[in-house]
Image: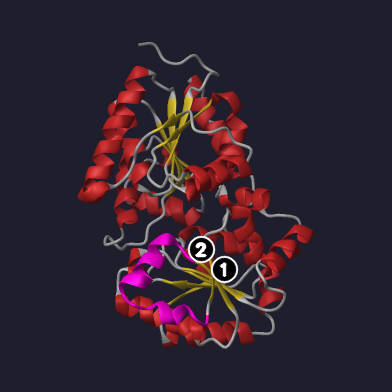
Amino acid sequence: MSKTPSGIRDVAVVLGTRPEIIKLAPLIRLLGERARIVHTGQHYDSALSGTFFANFGLPQPHLLLDGATGPWGRGAQIGELTAELARAFVQDPPRVVVVQGDTNSTSAGAQAAQYCGIPVVHVEAGLRSGDRTMPEEINRLVVGVLADVHCAATEQAAANLLATGTAPERIHVTGNTVVEATLMSLPDPEERDRIAREHGVDGPFVLATVHRPENTDSPERLRALLTALAGLGERVVMPLHPRTRAKVKQFGLEHLLDRIDVTDPVDHPTFLALADRARLLVSDSGGIQEEATVLKKPLLVVRTSTERPEAVTAGFSRLVEPGAPLQEAARAALDHPDAHDRLSATASPYGDGTASARIHALATALADGTPLPDTGTGR
């Protein structure tokens, strides 16, 4: 079968989670009719995912798969998604496949494309935590081998790729699309105030999110984390992830939520509005580590390792353990009188908000068979 004609859905953008929708939205908008949105269904919810597409003015996915994990775990999910994507790419081959980050969908999309002989562009390439117990780290390593063009967010990410033997000419330092995605989604100041009032916060508060298995699958860590938040002596607002809610109930920790303002999950603009109005962010999310650098907010990262050391080095985030270390670090951050001014004057290490334009130029050049533009390399 001949390839899809240039300009007609010939750049397949594979995604499967809400963070991928957020970070790829600016690129999809730039691609216009060239974008073929392929949703693997990894974390698909018709209401929430639909809202995220609508927030960014994106069409609904052109192809939606059933990416539910089922009882067999990650290996089966990645294998099944790879097979489904390969079939789709054989039936109607795109000229390029774009994947983002480090999810199971990222790994499956890159594998399917390479098995079908289709070039792969990896957005947010080169992140490394050095922790192979993280499922995301394995996905990063796999895609690092398969990608044809590596769009590294920072020089550090480029250096990580060079250290693993990636050819320098395949590495392009583009910045991170999270910068423009955050600015695109952030409501105006009046709307931020309205959202804060709607959520009952008209004074100082801490915004917290927890969802990673590292914290939620361990009753000891989850208990320590919630106990620390409840004992801050500061109002804590916590949009509760369904996974976390289920684990709180499973471990009998519901009483620890009594002193925390728990809300249902919120959409991206609402979260950013609350984060902008918060004094301190506490999270185990990867994306929030980047968004905090755009919002100029201090963040405590409740994890044992991070693949985003740039945010730590720049002074926006700090790794902490749950329990007393979290509580002590939170109190120190809240009591720091100069934190706001210092962070406001600190540039985000993730670029100037033009990453999507650089990636668009690379992806379309690859699709058209023309020389790749010089956006910078890790050399």
Residue furthest top as drawn = 2
Going by the numbered disc 1, the residue's amino acid type is Ala
Q: Nearer the viewer, residue 332 or 223?
A: 223
Neighbor class of circle 1 (other Cα within 10 Å; few <14, some 14-19, many 20+) is some
Quarter that holds the N terminus: top left
State left or right for residue 25 relative to residue 197.
Answer: left
The location of residue 14, given as percent across then percent down, is 43, 36
Q: Nearer the viewer, residue 370 or 92?
A: 92
Contact flag, marks 1 and 2 (Cβ < 8 Å): yes
State left or right for residue 268 relative to residue 286.
Answer: right
Name which quarter of the figure residue 303 lies in: bottom left
Q: Is residue 112 above or below residue 181?
A: above
- Highlighted range, magenta: 240-259
Q: Residue at x 61, y 38 (%)?
A: 357
**SS at mark 2 in the image:** helix
Q: Residue at x 61, y 34 (%)?
A: 29
The residue indicated by pointer 1 is 314
Magenta-colored segment: predominant secondary structure: helix
**SS at mark 1 in the image:** loop
The location of residue 224, given as percent across then percent down, is 38, 82
Q: Nearer the viewer, residue 313 or 336?
A: 336
The residue indicated by pointer 2 is 310
Q: What separation in Å lies between label 1 and label 2 (alpha carbons)?
A: 6 Å
Neighbor class of circle 2 (other Cα within 10 Å; few <14, some 14-19, many 20+) is many
Going by the numbered disc 2, the residue's amino acid type is Glu
State left or right for residue 85 relative to residue 185.
Answer: left
Name which quarter of the figure residue 203 lies in: bottom right
Q: Can you tell which mark lies on residue 120?
A: none
Q: Residue at x 57, y 51 (%)?
A: 178
